[in-house]
Amino acid sequence: MKKRTYLLLILFILIVGCAPIPEEELRTDLNNLNDDELSYVLSDDNNFVGEASKTLPIKNLTRLSPIKRSIKPYKVSCIDSDGGRNYEAAGAVTLFNYPGGVINRSDKCWNNGINLQEYVCRDGKYKGDHTFDCSSLGKNYVCKGNKCLEESKFLIITSNELLGPAERLAKIRQSEGISTIVQNFDELDINRDPNLLLSWLTNFKKDNPSLKYLLLFGNSNKIPTFYSENPEADLETITDFKYSLPKDNLPTLAVGRIPVRDSSQADLWINKIEAYESYNPDPDVFLFGYTAEYDGYAETHKDEIESKGFTVSTYKPESNSSVADDILNEAGPIIANEINEGKGFSIFYGHGTAFIFHPVFHISNLALLNNKEKPTIVFTGGCDTANYNYEVPGIAEEFLANEDGAIAVIGATREGGYGYDYKFIPDFFENCNANRLGDVFNSAVKENYYLVINEDIWTLAENQVDWANYFVERMTLLGDPTTLVCQN
């Protein structure tokens, strides 16, 4: 009799233990499970269950077994908004026929900014979650916005018309390991207001803290620009300086612009970029000019630049004529011939307008160039010669837009000069050892800014900061800031 009683008691325990858990209690139990435990009780994958039994403590499995049995009749189904194991999309799984109603589990980033907790459904079944290391996709990948994404170091903003050439450039930079994003300005719907573009860029930078370079791909009719006023004269200066997201009046981004007007010009410029990368020019520097600026600085700069390992040649016309056209007629062909031979950098000292390096090289002299396989980088000390907002394109634009000419032009968009006491040029070459053009440009600008702040110059002392700010705003890089320069 006693033996029969024990058997009945054991049978009762088994029956009770196998009885389904009431729905209200089951919902409470499920809500108290962690992700691993929920994955275990919902899975009908024997391999997964076997793996879970290796990682979950035995006492957990004992506790979870009745929950797993109780939920099985509900036939919980699952859909995955990002299609399964999709680490570059922020997704969520939705569980149906779940006790108490539908529930969601969303992909989420860990606090370390690298790991992603990915939730997965497959074939309508919940497959649980797992941790994925976003950096395994590439060194620039992080976990942000509940997905793995490649943080951009280089942003190209262009118009719909120039999208094809911009994508060509992006592929070149991506192949060099520079993570690049192309943004179609026409899709932003911001009515050509530079302040709205600046606001968009500011937010983009917050989401992409690694952003370092910005290229405005198109002239000011394609991508809007800003204007600033000379603090001491009634003059308006075109400037992209605000797009550099300045801090303490100095740029934090390296900004360049290619002021092309159509896709044909853009493609010609990209062709020169490809040629420049293949050409890998020797560190040859060509200094030329005619005025007192040339006499005062060119020879001094020649010595300083040569001390950095560059080969420097110079040219000043021999003409004694007082007629500017006579000097131009002598100098133009000689300067064009020097550039055609292949110069990494061609540096002009002197005055100018939008159309002439006065009085030695006119916009019409560009027809003498045949250096498309050996493009140069041009520096100009003349007023207005880097201005990119004329109805009739100026000399800087034509240097860039022609089949031959330059891949970049650096200079002032209003009053000329190279900063305080022409220190910009030697400062540039001081830091030009296999660096990106935008980094070298910004470094030279900053050095000259501090010189203006800390030294007595021709402006009154109380205007030092105003003048320094104006200098920074008018100095312009027309070119790709990610161009690799001074590789030898």
Image: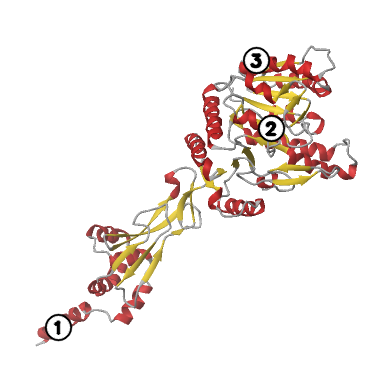
Quadrant showing the C terminus = top right
Name the residue beneath numbered marker 1: 6
Q: Judge by depth and name the residue closer to the eye, 419 or 449.
A: 419
Q: State whether residue 343 appears in this view.
A: no
Closer to the N terminus: mark 1 or mark 3? 1
Picture quarter containing residue 63?
A: bottom left
Q: Residues within 10 Å of mark 2 (few under 14, many from 20)?
A: many
Q: Tell me which amino acid carries mark 3.
A: Asn
**In the image, farthest residue toward the front:** 392
Identify which residue is drawn at 24% across, 57% down: 47
Give the quarter of the figure containing the N terminus.
Answer: bottom left
Q: What label does residue 394 carry, if any?
A: 2
* Label 3: few (<14), some (14–19) or many (≥20) C-alpha neighbours in 10 Å: some
How far apart are the two marked residues, 1 and 3, measured between alpha carbons? 110 Å
Q: Circle 3 — which element?
A: helix
Position in image of residue 198 (x %, y %): 64, 51
Camera-nearest label, 2 or 1: 2
Residue indicated by mark 3: 337
